Image (cartoon, rainbow, N blue to C red):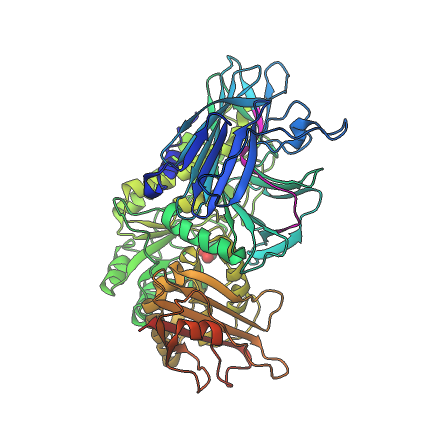
Amino acid sequence: MLKTFSSVAALFSAFVIAWGQPAATFDPASKVFRLDGGDVSYVFGVNSSGELQQLYWGGRLAKTDQFPRAVPMGEWASFDTPYTNTPQEYVGWGAGLFLEPALKVTYADGNRDLVLHYESHTITADGLNVVLKDIKRPIYVTLHYAIDAESGILARSATIENGLNQPVTVEQAAAAAWALPPAHYTMNYLTGRWAGEWTLTQEAVHPGERVIESRRGSTGHQANPWFALQAGEANEDQGEVWFGALAWSGSWRITVEQDQLDAVRITGGFNPFDFGFVLHAGERLQTPVFYGGYSAHGLGGVSRLLHRFEVEHVLPRRAGANTVPKPRPVIYNSWEATEFNVTEAGQMALAEKAAALGVDRFVMDDGWFGQRKDDHAGLGDWYVNQEKFPHGLKPLIDKVHALGMDFGLWVEPEMVNPDSDLFRKHPDWVLHFVGRPETQQRNQLVLNLARPDVRAYVLGFLDKLLTENDIAFLKWDYNRNWSEPGWEQLPAAEQKRVYVEYTHSLYGILAELRRRHPKVELESCSGGGGRVDLGILKYVDEVWPSDNTDPFDRLTQQDGFSYAYTPQVMMAWVTDSPHWLNKRSTSLSYRMLSSMQGSLGIGANIAKWSEDEAATAKRLIAAYHQVQPTIVQGDLYRLISPRNGSEFSATQTVNREKNQSVVFAFIHSTQEGRKFPLLKLKGLDPAAVYALTPIEGKTRPETPATASGAWWMNHGLEFDESFAGDFQAAAFRLDRK
Ligand code: DGJ
């Protein structure tokens, strides 16, 4: 049943070693391990008790700096043991541990004590593997470490192996635990709900444990597996911040725990709620990867490190390609225009309009298959609806190609409507508990992708669809969370494997589709941003951050999203006004500029657009195409946050060579005549000369046409008096002369 997780091995080999130096070292005298990458050093050692103890994580140290042998913390009176007080790399539950364990097991004889000591290690090309073993029984944990030479971002995970000749139940397994010294920390994390994802939530870390998690079987809209802890006065631009992101698209949990001695530990991995993975004799369980990093440049520094790392090391590359993934094509998507009411003629008409705007990819959304007239029927029946497309998809795809675009299609492979041929034939294929009601959400049930027959069906129909049609892109949707997660084919004690096997099966299907169809690109959508994490981002090229396409709401959502994820993957459609959700009216120019902060798409009913609207969109799509690499792959500076009802907001991106920069500015509502603030730009080369070109809007008439980077950063950019009112937007580009 257990797979070998080659994806994890691939991940580690993706790192680059600078200057041919090993990324990790071990000093046999002090038994200290050290990893160096970018501006970061990470140090831990085998302490005098034999435990693996964390020693340092922060700014890069000199090569000559030495650490003495790790000494365990003392006890705190008779209540807190050294085992509890010592920050361990991966602590087993046993021996009087009162804090969050990394690993908790129950042996077949009812014993539940697990104390992991150092056993051996190997240095790898980009990090190291350290083997721990229980002090009495052959339970092994191999900790994997890799560090990125450029960003200093660490990738950590664990492999748990049962060397007994009896089964062991793993009740809790973290990917990694991180430790920080006592300080005043502010915790940043991302929360939300459907249509309200990506709220940056900030709170002081207090004694006790703060839990962020999903119990839903997938990542979830409500919390995202990312955190950043700011020390002391750290802010957007400066100060020390430690951050992490868990690469897992199933139920997950991250705990941030300030212990009895004020130190802080962050532990994350599989969600222990309802968890129970029976490891048979000789079997292994591989955890997800937990990435962690450090920046001395505030939250802005964190997201710049993460954005670059994601593009260069996480996102899938085209087979054989040596270059980082390209910026996304500008897409058109039919959902908000037609919903389920798709027809060949209607889609062709939209495709003509989209092509005239300069769109690169035409995507037909829900409604094209089975008996899909609304959300009550059809999911599971992946044949083309004959009434809507009498000659199959070919005429539409040919038309889209003739118009100079490629073609994308919506699918929701993991779901089934009870009103479908698939469910009538295989009612047992869904997640369920025998004899219990099956809870429907959006009239649909979840297929148990962990089952080999379901996996084969899903892979089979997708492969057929992609083989028979010239499809460049799939929008892979997932519109509900789990209920009744039973898996009756397995023995009762083993059914909870579903929490691990389902997600691996999903990743396996995505990887296999990419292997068989190397040109196909994928989007992860889950009713908006319900499945965005660094696990799925290894397999998909982009994500749909939210079903909320209101351009004003999107500013805050995009701001929140940007703390953890690169704008390269952040699809942003321009839709109709007034907006369906908030009934807010905004100009097309405002909507376009809001979406141009990410990977631009058009999702409006363009069949109804006036000539003026089409001309505005065409002009701005052309302008976007020219600067898109700088926007989605450049260094992002959040100049003014839109959060907390801010009157104004602004962002700036600078490309890697520092020869282009793009500035976006938005006004919510001008109040008391206040002018848009002077924008002091960031990240430019002070000695270079940059020419300023408006994309939309005007600067003050006195603004020089060209000036040094020093001028734009120190003197700043001033807006024209006319930049005022409600829901206004402006954008400028700067190009090195
Ligand atoms: C939810 C997605 O987020 C929407 O964009 C759209 O694809 C609908 N599903 C279709 O049912």
Which image quarter is the C terminus in? bottom left
| Rendering coords of residue 353 (x, y %) | 33, 70
Can residue 455 be seen by looking at this rendering?
yes
Q: Nearer the viewer, residue 62 or 218?
A: 62
Would you place residue 353 above or below residue 511 in this image? below
Q: Residue at x 45, y 56 (%)?
A: 304
Q: Residue furthest bottom?
A: 701
Q: Kindly indicate the quadrant of the structure image that contains residue 352.
A: bottom left
Would you place residue 339 above or below residue 466 in this image? below
Q: Is residue 493 magenta?
A: no
Which image quarter is the N terminus in? top left
| Rendering coords of residue 44 (x, y %) | 52, 33
How many marks do you count on the picture? 0
Would you place residue 449 above or below residue 657 in this image? above
Q: Is residue 186 magenta?
A: yes
Q: Kindly indicate the quadrant of the structure image that contains residue 216.
A: top right
Can residue 423 be seen by looking at this rendering?
no
| Rendering coords of residue 671 (x, y %) | 62, 80
Q: Nearer the viewer, residue 573 or 210?
A: 210
Would you place residue 370 above or below residue 592 in this image? above
Magenta stretch prevailing secondary structure: strand
| Rendering coords of residue 258 (x, y %) | 67, 41
Q: Residue at x 43, y 83 (%)?
A: 703
Bounds of the magenta span?
A: 170-187
Q: Residue at x 76, y 28 (%)?
A: 79
Q: Nearer the viewer, residue 231 or 511?
A: 231
